Image (cartoon, rainbow, N blue to C red):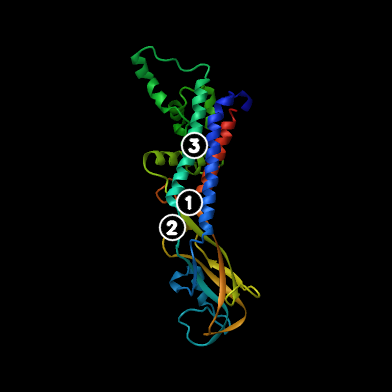
């Protein structure tokens, strides 16, 4: 099919440079996120968990028969006993504010360049159309076929509903050779959804379209930071020396935005030998967690990973442009 498509050659230079610029900005965004994470902006606290924090599944563990060395340790325990495990809650508190406005402006820059690059392709296809729609010879004809309106709506089409595709083609591709509509159709969110892909609303190009409209007409595409707990390591004492203790994450919510002190996980630490409680217990615990930049709750694709969504949109746009090379 690609051999039958018009070759735009050097006419695509501008569109290709915009895609390269968007990819470069995305790398800058990744680097900015890494620099932020390297500053350790979210100190972790390890605390005896409040039973109210437990998930139902974790809390039910406390109803099992209790033996001398199989006890869940809570604040209310006052009598001396032997334990072979210790349950701790992991909480996180923001220390450094993320550069959300800078990230949002970078996101807007990426969205603009990718969307503009796709529009450039449509404009160049309009210019090489061997049989463009004739200019109406009278004012009444211009009114009837909306020729002037079409000059204002030409651009890359975005359609998530198959029933609206014909109208979308008429609005966006009026000046493009009609046979090329099929090429554009295969790139549409509704087409991908019909052929075993994700929901049209989750298609990277539809998200790109929604973000661009938001950025042009409302405000910058506000981003936020999401943190997810990955795993933990523990040692007895003040530093990671000696044998490592076994740990198991009993519960952890999905990665989500950080707003003030935030609960991250409920972790169980297993001792190498029973330890008498109450006594002074020193334990060094290290947690590993992920930091991602996600779209804010007011964005069209709230809570979606920004870098992943934009990377997919850049890749799809570059592949589409390459069809006309």
Return the residue found at the far bottom.
80
Q: Nearer the viewer, mark 3 or mark 1?
A: 3
In the rendered image of this protein, does residue 41 appear above or below residue 159?
below
Which image quadrant: the N terminus? top right
Element carrying mark 2: loop
Q: Nearer the viewer, mark 2 or mark 1?
A: 2
Choose the circle earlier in sequence order: 2 or 3: 2
Residue at image coords 63%, 74%: 241
Q: Nearer the viewer, mark 2 or mark 3?
A: 2
Which image quadrant: the C terminus? top right
Q: Nearer the viewer, residue 236 or 34?
A: 34
Residue at image coords 55%, 44%: 311
Q: Nearer the viewer, residue 54 or 19?
A: 19
> Dot 2: few (<14), some (14–19), or many (≥20) neighbours within 10 Å?
few
Q: Please give the residue where the numbered disc 3 appears in the rendered image.
A: 113
Element carrying mark 1: strand
In the rendered image of this protein, does residue 324 appear above or below residue 288?
above
Q: Please give the residue where the numbered disc 2 appears in the rendered image.
A: 97
**Callout 3 touching callout 1 (CB < 8 Å):** no
Q: CA distance from mark 2 to mark 1?
A: 15 Å
Q: Position of residue 8 (x, y in %)?
A: 57, 24
Q: Answer yes or no: is residue 106 visible.
A: yes
Q: Please give the residue where the numbered disc 1 appears in the rendered image.
A: 294
């Amino acid at each position: 099919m690609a051999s039958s498509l018009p070759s735009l050659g050097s006419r695509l230079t501008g569109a290709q440079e915009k895609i390269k610029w968007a990819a470069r900005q995305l790398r800058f965004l990744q680097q900015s996120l890494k620099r932020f994470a390297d500053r350790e902006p979210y100190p972790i606290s390890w605390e005896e968990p409040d039973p109210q924090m437990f998930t139902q599944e974790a809390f039910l563990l406390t109803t099992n028969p209790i033996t001398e060395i199989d006890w869940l340790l809570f604040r209310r325990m006052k009598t001396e006993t032997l334990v072979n495990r210790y349950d701790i809650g992991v909480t996180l508190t923001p220390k450094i504010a993320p550069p959300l406005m800078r990230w949002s402006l970078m996101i807007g820059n990426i969205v603009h360049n990718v969307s503009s690059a796709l529009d450039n392709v449509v404009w160049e296809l309009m210019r090489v159309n061997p049989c463009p729609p004739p200019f109406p010879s009278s004012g009444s004809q211009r009114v009837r076929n909306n020729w002037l309106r079409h000059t204002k709506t030409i651009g890359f089409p975005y359609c998530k509903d198959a029933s609206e595709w014909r109208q979308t083609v008429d609005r966006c591709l009026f000046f493009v050779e009609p046979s090329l509509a099929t090429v554009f159709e295969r790139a549409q969110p509704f087409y991908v959804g019909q052929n075993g892909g994700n929901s049209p609303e989750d298609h990277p190009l539809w998200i790109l379209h929604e973000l661009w409209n938001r950025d042009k007409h409302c405000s910058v595409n506000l981003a936020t930071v999401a943190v997810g707990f990955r795993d933990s390591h523990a040692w007895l004492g003040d530093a990671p020396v000696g044998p490592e203790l076994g740990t198991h994450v009993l519960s952890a919510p999905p990665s989500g935005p950080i707003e003030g002190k935030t609960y991250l996980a409920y972790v169980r630490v297993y001792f190498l030998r029973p330890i008498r409680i109450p006594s002074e217990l020193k334990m060094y615990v290290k947690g590993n967690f992920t930091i991602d930049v996600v779209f804010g709750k007011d964005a069209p694709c709230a809570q979606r990973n920004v870098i992943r969504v934009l990377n997919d949109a850049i890749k799809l746009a570059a592949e589409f442009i390459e069809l006309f090379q």
